[in-house]
Image (cartoon, rainbow, N blue to C red):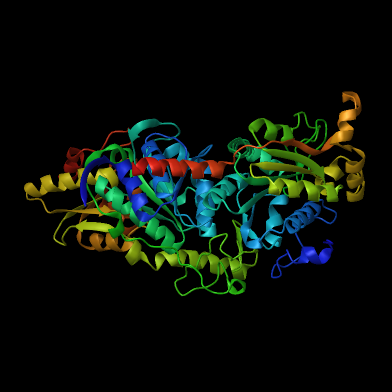
Amino acid sequence: MTIKLMQGNEAVSWGALAAGCKFFAGYPITPSTEIAEMLSRELPKVGGKFIQMEDEIASLAACIGASVGGLKSMTATSGPGFSLMQEHIGYAAMTEIPCVIVNVQRLGPSTGAPTAASQGDVMQARWGTHGDHPIIVISPTTVSQSFDLTVKAFNFSEKYRTPVILLLDEIIGHMREKIDLPDFENVERVERIATNVPAEWYKPYGDSLSDVPPMANFGEGYRYHITGLFHDPMGYPTQRLDEIDPWIERVHRKIYRNLNDISLVEEDWAPTDRTVVLSFGASARSARHAVKLARQNHLKVGSVTMLTIWPFAEEAVARIARTAKRIIVPEMNLGQLALEVERVAGRQKVVRVNRANGEMITPQMILEAIEGR
Amino acid sequence: MPHDEHTAYSYLRPTKKFPNVWCAGCGIGVVMGALIRAIDRLGLDKDQVALVSGIGCTGRMPVYMDFNTIHTTHGRALAFATGLKIARPEMKVIAIMGDGDAVAIGGNHFIHAARRNIGITAIVVNNEIYGMTGGQYSPTTPVNMRASTAPYGNIEPPMPVCDLAIAAGASFVARGTVYHAVELDRLLEQAISKEGFSMVEAVSYCHTGYGRLNKLGSAVDMMRALKDNSVGLIAAQKLTPEERGQKIVRGVLHNVDKTEYTRLYAGLIERAQAQAAK
């Protein structure tokens, strides 16, 4: 363990290296650029590879290509670049190729305010690419967690053969904070499930007990086909309903049957709490502070931090809604995660605290909501 | 070694159901045959060959062939291929694209892959039209020709694909046609053996979309037109500019030696590690 002072973006880069990332492709964009800069310096030292591509579309494409070649791959971007990456988030979901996409959210839409904070990409991270697909989106609240969740992102990605989005915001990305950097050898790393059957038996998209088919890397003796078209167990294009339906069911099942593993929620509330503040990212910092102040005033308030945003932790929210009278959802947008909370808890129970001008939600704003003013 | 049809069969996927998606008489199959013959002649290990394609008629080629094959998104084949080549520098990575795929939606990636001189062979099957979507004009459709989105004739000048690759920095650039199949074998063979970025423009035709709209006749007529309207590089140099006119010039147009990208990156890693060790 080494104690250091660093930015969230730096912690993400160290987390990637600790997780075994060996390939980064990206395009410069504020406020995520530090990740690219740092990995351009650090990756070659460990035999990894960095490339600056011609745009964000190409960046994620290169990551997927490198992942097919067997390297753990990551890209990092922000709002406008994240919009461009949607095409290949869908491709990675369809072809079940592991990759990690870091989105350090900034104020949008469009070019918006490059250095201003936002949490406006919650829904885009879920539904930005076309078609029904599962996705894992996780979001840290501290610099230290930025490291841990980057490692998690890689591990989820390899374990479930899925793109994973690490959703930071400008505040977490650029904030400097103390971090206990662990020895990388002690960090838990998950590797993709390899195949060991003879090449002629290999089915790249066949059934498996875990719903995650083993993945062969190109160049290792398993010649097979990958396509963004709907495909049969051999990876060949299909239009047959009896092959499309099972695919759709399986790729959703492989995520949703593992919610216990994927859903990371920090809970600090009791059934006696009348109000629970539910938040994520930088807003969760203000939320926790507001809850602390309210408790000093002897108010019965709890706090819940969603580290995993998608798949949405319905079970946890339903549990809270059974006892709490109100759930306050502060977020730096006009109400995106609140839509999900309302869906599970009922609209009458949810109080939104929103700010979409690039400034952080203050503890005072949340405290006022807690006090019902 | 004779190249009969049995050679081709040994490179086609035994488990993939044929027939293919292409119209009867399409030139893309000739390019596929030429690619198989070139790979066979070079004696490459199938496990060490990757075919990367984009979207469109040409993009469907890899699925039939028994290599590591990835059918990606429209225009992005070279971006995927770049990541794969960096991950596996020892592999032969071949990107197969149509004209719309390579120089319209994928134009940016085309330029930058050539500029980096990364060791990928790009094959651009140029049929001067978007075939799969039904004959819309592409960036290589000649002026005044009709397309389903150019009912009054195309007013945009066509993109010179080979000139673009040369200007952007490719190591090897060649042009052939699907009529001159044997020559195409040789051009592909040379391109695949080249260490840096190589590009072969395989001029083909689309008798279904483009040919019908422009009254150019059957597939046979269009194939014959490739023969009549093209000229080898050496013969072309003897012609006056007027005589050369709109003729398709075939042959190796550009061939230079410069250090390939992944080789340069291996050097960069060595330097970084040496510095870190200090």
Can you say whether B133 is above or below A356 in the image? below
State the residue in front, B129 or B30. B30
Where is residue A314? Give x, y as percent. Answer: 33, 61
Residue A276 lies, in percent from the top left, at 20, 53
| Residue name at image x 68 percent, y 42 percent | B198
Number of marks in the rendered image: 0
Residue B140 visible? The answer is no
A351 with respect to A206 (left or right) = left
Could you tell me residue A15's position as x and y percent? 33, 50
Residue A277: horizontal and vertical position, in percent? 22, 50
Question: Horizontally, is A257 left or right of B59 in the view?
Answer: left
**Quadrant of the rendered structure where residue A223 is?**
bottom right
Left or right: where B258 falls relative to B187: left
Residue at 60% x, 35% y is B115
In-front residue for pair A155/A140: A155
Q: Is residue B219 visible?
A: yes
Question: For the point 80% across and 35% down, which residue is it?
Answer: B151
Q: Quadrant of the C terminus of chain A?
A: top left
Q: Residue at x 60, y 36 (%)?
A: B108
Q: Nearer the viewer, residue A125 or B86?
A: B86
In front here: B274 or A166?
B274
